[in-house]
Image (cartoon, grey):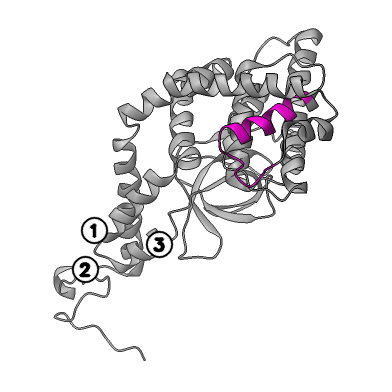
Amino acid sequence: MAEQIRRNDPCPCGSGKKYKKCHGLLNQTNINQLIDEELEQVIGRFYSLVPVPGHVKQNAQLFVEWERRLSPYYDRETIHSQAVDYMYLIQEPEFWSMHVRNSSEKAVRPGVQDVLSGWEQPVSLFGVVESINESAAQLRDVLGSGSYTLDIPKDMELSVGEALFGHFLMDNRKEDRVMLMNGLAFLESGNPDVLHAAEQLRKKKHHLNQREFLKLYSVDLYEMIGRDEAILPPISDDEDKKRTDKVEEESDVLSLVGQFLSENEVESTGLEEKTGRFLEQVNPKARKPEGVAAGAIRFGQMAGLLEELDIPKTRIAEHFDVSPSTVQKYADDMLKFHRVKAEA
């Protein structure tokens, strides 16, 4: 039989207070509830600190681009929230990690500190609801091989078959359990075409880790979901073809860049992300994707992103079967584009 806790013993919650003055009248379920409330406060405090005004100025172009892409499907406040999550959880997660460490140092209860120890790396997933048991949903990650259990918040309704994309936090009190961090984008229809498109895009970019992939394609996922959920007049065949061609062209260029880096065993410091931004915002009119890809490699050398790659421009041109002048043209275009962004 477990030893009974006496009134003047230290409270097992770890607060440092006597049991009679802390949780003497509470059972373990109540203690877990208090831990949940404290964890929610950690998240709430974070969103009271961001976005930092200086960071908004630095990312002004990002907000403009996200509003341009997503305004047909989401309201401005939702788009702003999605962009802020992207900035602090995917693009530059160090601010969030520091907040978690500071919160853990200030936390009194070991139970809170234990959960916070798994929070420095948020889980961003596109999950399909495979089953629901009481207040928990089993999610299969479309972008990976993982499966997670989500504690469904009281104000959320989920059904089997629908999907959601958003940011979660591990709850290590139970295996593979996640907690909702912030708002979600819902694919209520569970449209298999959208899910398949997301899966295929991830497979094409298998050389990228999850964070690198989401840095490049988060806005595309929000757009895919929003377009499916929106009640909008159908777009024309010509407009649909233009969109499809643009996405395929960007995908081809990034695939060629990734393949070149892999074949030459070269580590990239942000080259694919910078190439993706250039393609998305400039939309270069190239005769073939190899020219832009070759220019991206040369740009990486010029910008100091490929320090281990010491080969001349002519060899890059030969590899992609384009002229050296084409290589330099797109390299200069990318260098100019990113200089302007840095000075903005």
Q: Residues within 10 Å of mark 3 (few under 14, many from 20)?
A: some
For residue 235, which quarter of the picture? top right
Distance between the alpha carbons at the discs numbered 1 and 2: 12 Å
The mark nearer the N terminus, 2 or 3, is 2
Left or right position of 199 against 187 = right
Q: How many marks?
A: 3
Q: Is residue 10 above or below residue 139?
A: below
Q: Residue at label 1? A: 106
Q: Residue placed at 67% from the left, 43% from the top? A: 310
Q: Which residue is mark 2?
A: 15
Secondary structure, mark 2, is loop
Q: Give the label, 1 or 2, closer to the camera.
A: 1
Q: Is residue 67 magenta?
A: no
The x and y percentages for residue 29 are 36, 65
* Residue behind mark 3: 117
Segment tinted magenta in the rendering:
291-310
Examine the residues drawn in magenta and state their main secondary structure: helix
Q: Position of residue 297 (x, y in %)?
A: 68, 34
Q: Secondary structure at mark 1?
A: helix
In-front residue for pair 118/133 = 118
Q: Amino acid at mark 3?
A: Ser
Identify residue type, mark 1: Lys
Residue at x 64% of width, y 39% of height: 163
Residue under the image location 35 percent in, 31 percent down: 51
Q: Disc 1 or 3, which lies upstream in sequence? A: 1
In this picture, is 81 found above or below 135? above
Vertical placement of residue 343 versus 301, above or below: above
Q: Position of residue 95 (x, y in %)?
A: 37, 44
Q: Is residue 242 left or right of residue 121?
A: right
